[in-house]
């Protein structure tokens, strides 16, 4: 009909979300509420994944402690389901504090344990996080010698000068630092030489299926070479097959981590039976 214009769907006229986007948004809101409820009711804990020495079959180098929250039914929710949504929020800082507290309690209860804990560079200036770390190091000074703090490559590049200063202050207290997701493309070489990381964890995107991918083998050899030039320990993330583990060892990577060896567990063999959530 002449002069007729096609009417837009009411949702499009209002600029509202499509049904799919709306469902995704509602799901994200639900996850955020679950995380906030877990924090409020002290329903958080760590899952522990071993990081294996590359030069010794079956020998653990250290463990990584990965934060988990429990929903109202007691179901464990992995960090991957929520960290990307809260990383730059106050809730993200609170989760960092809880991960640190759980990790330090585990170190205190298990004198032979060496443990890495994830943190955001934004937590360096977050007073509750620093207060937690300082309190434990004051009462148990040797804990720092068994603590590794992991900062992702992207997080470190948000405030590189702050991270460099932070590391210089904490390393004399025995704490080691690991750059997580190395090779993900965020690092600027001009800053890399100023960082003093002890460990580089090579991003899992290059390690998954590396046995069948010559290009990734070349990339990993280059990343490994950079780490060795700076005298850093190397960890290969996301090792999922025996073949990939063999290639990682052939390249010379010091430690291997992934589901081929073990999935993260909230109840490792060495774990103190007392619930971490009940400790200060």
Image (spheres, grey):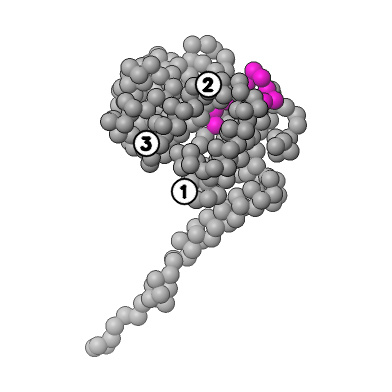
Label 2 CA crowd tier, 10 Å (few <14, some 14–19, many 20+): some
The N terminus sits in image quarter? bottom left
Query: Residue 273 appears at what percent x and percent y?
Result: 75, 29
Going 52% across and 34% down the picture, which residue do you hit?
A: 118
Which segment is the magenta one? 108-117
Q: Helix, strand, or loop for circle 1?
A: loop
Q: CA distance from mark 1 to mark 3?
A: 16 Å
Q: Seen from this angle, which residue lies furthest left?
A: 2
The quadrant where residue 57 appears: top right
Residue in the foreground of this view, choosing between 113 and 212: 113
Asked whether disc 1 touches disc 3, contact meaning CB atoms under 8 Å apart, the reply is no
| Residue corresponding to mark 3 | 160
- Is residue 220 visible in this depiction of the protein? yes
The C terminus sits in image quarter? top right
Mark sitting earlier along the chain (1/3)? 1
Going 48% across and 24% down the picture, which residue do you hit?
A: 171
Q: How many marks?
A: 3
Q: CA distance from mark 2 to mark 1?
A: 28 Å
The quadrant where residue 135 appears: top right
Query: Residue 99 appears at what percent x and percent y?
Result: 59, 37
Label 3 CA crowd tier, 10 Å (few <14, some 14–19, many 20+): many
| Residue corresponding to mark 2 | 174
């Amino acid at each position: 009909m002449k002069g007729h214009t096609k009417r837009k769907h009411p949702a499009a006229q209002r600029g509202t979300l499509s049904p799919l986007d709306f469902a995704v948004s509602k799901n994200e809101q639900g996850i955020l509420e679950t995380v906030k409820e877990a924090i409020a009711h002290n329903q958080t804990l760590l899952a522990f994944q071993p990081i294996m020495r590359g030069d010794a079959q079956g020998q653990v180098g250290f463990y990584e402690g990965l934060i988990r929250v429990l929903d109202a039914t007691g179901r464990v929710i992995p960090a991957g389901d929520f960290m990307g949504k809260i990383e730059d929020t106050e809730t993200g800082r609170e989760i960092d504090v809880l991960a640190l507290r759980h990790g330090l309690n585990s170190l205190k209860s298990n004198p032979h344990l060496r443990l890495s804990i994830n943190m955001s560079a934004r937590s360096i200036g977050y007073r509750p996080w620093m207060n937690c770390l300082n309190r434990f190091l004051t009462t148990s000074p040797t804990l720092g010698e068994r603590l590794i703090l992991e900062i992702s490559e992207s997080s470190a590049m948000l405030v590189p000068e702050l991270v460099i200063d932070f590391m210089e202050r904490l390393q004399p207290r025995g704490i080691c630092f690991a750059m997580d997701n190395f090779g993900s493309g965020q690092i600027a070489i001009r800053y890399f030489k100023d960082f003093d990381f002890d460990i580089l964890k090579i991003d899992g995107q290059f390690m998954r299926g590396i046995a069948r991918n010559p290009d990734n083998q070349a990339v990993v050899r280059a990343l490994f070479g950079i780490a060795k030039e700076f005298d850093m320990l190397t960890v290969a993330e996301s090792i999922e097959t025996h073949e990939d583990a063999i290639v990682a060892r052939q390249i010379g990577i010091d430690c291997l981590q992934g589901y081929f060896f073990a999935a993260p567990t909230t109840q490792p063999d060495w774990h103190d039976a007392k619930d971490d959530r009940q400790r200060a």
